[in-house]
Amino acid sequence: MLVFPTPRRRVTPLALIGVTTLAAVLAAGAAPGAAAAPRPADVSSHIAPAGKGKDGDDPAEDKPAETSDDPKAGSNAAAEVMRRQEPLLDAGLAISELDDGGLGGLRLDVPKNTLHVWWRGDVPAKVKDAIERFRAADGIRIEVGESRYSQRELLKATEGLSRRSGDLPELVGVAPAVEGSGLAVYVNPQILVTITLEMLPPGSTITEMPVVQQVSRGFDIAPWWAGSVAQPVNGGPVCSTGFAVEKRFLGIPTESGVIVAEHCAPGGGVAFDSGSGIRIGTAGAPSTLPKTDSLYVRAPGGSAARIYDGGVGVGEFSKPVVGVTGNLPGQYVCTSGAATGAHCDVVINLTNFEHVLAPSGIVVRSSLATQQQGRPAVGLGDSGGPVFVVTAADPGKVKAAGMINGGVLQTNCEGFGSTCFVQVTFTNIYYVQAAHDVYVKTS
């Protein structure tokens, strides 16, 4: 099974945006004016009020409208491409589940309705049968090629090089190449590079890239939704809430909370407040499962299976979360952080990308994705926020894909935020669930 697929070949120099520097980016918070902007009335009827707004009014009057019919608003603009990609994504994830060790890589090419599959050695009969079923049932193209290595082999090599990051200060990140051709290694051009191709598996590449910066909606109330402001009370940087999650015993929910980025409060054990100063809850200790950059915040006031969509303070609405999905190269996703709002047309370049977040030094295993028009994918203050896909059956609903942790390649913000980035790094949602033994809440 391909848990965290990966891409890519040699690229031009990049600048990772991470969650901006822990202090600088996350301290950025919401966009100017967000605090004063009134929230539209909530037309949702299935979310029971669980607290009061900052002025003591009913939370139903403070939450943004449930949905938006504007086809250009927020993630609604991604509805058509998400509809076209869904059969490709389903096929890719199903094939990865059949991997017995030979899978070299997977990549979606949504514009061409094609799924690329690379395999080391002979393709097993069960995989060939699955490919033919998907071709016949969904009318998609599936092209199969040979890979030099398997993803499992390259993931071991990735972890081995990542463990040496303390001795290799120039190392920004490393991932398996999407075609299984070797390692894709990224180095900081401002530091003397001692890594050579001779140190890497044949077929690997070395590319210059700036370090990944940590990046951290306005004034939410319980039950907490994904994409609102979450600020540690110890004076740490302003970040965003991730997906609402719950713990279970024998399948029965026992408590609920939200996910946040660990670099917002390294080591955990810190309380988080909303943008209006209402206590969300206290983060537990980091998971023993490494490289997730995540914390679980237990929320006594409850959390709900919804995300903020649209802008920040202006043009806000929300959507229900109805499931979770994996990450594959070529996949389109959307992001929605408290500082810069929703961004779509963001395509995954790499998975299993191990990198260091500056300045916290936290090592993370991420997916790396790029906004296709060079517009913002994320900005300072968005750390911890949701990464998601819109469902094909109903663009008013979403599936959880990950949690924002960083960004690369600075660009001008468009309407919200002060510092934005073309690329985003995020943690696979399945990895976050496993790290804290929680389940994303769905409706």
Image: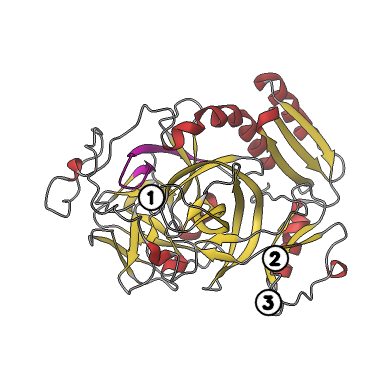
Residue 416 in the figure: left or right of residue 287: left
Residue 290 at x, y = what percent?
56, 66
SS for dot 3 = loop
Disc 3 to disc 2, C-alpha distance? 16 Å
Number of other residues with Cα within 10 Å of mark 2, as a class: few under 14, some 14 to 19, many 20 or more: some
Above or below 187: residue 321: above
Residue that label 3 marks: 169
Most foreground residue, 99 or 26: 26
Most foreground residue, 19 or 324: 19
Residue 309 at x, y = what percent?
39, 41
- Numbered badge on residue 159: 2
Residue 261 at x, y = what percent?
45, 62
x 60%, y 48%: residue: 370
Residue that label 1 marks: 227
Amino acid under disc 2: Glu
Number of other residues with Cα within 10 Å of mark 1, as a class: few under 14, some 14 to 19, many 20 or more: many
Please state which of the two labelled residues, at mark 2 or mark 1, is closer to the viewer: 1
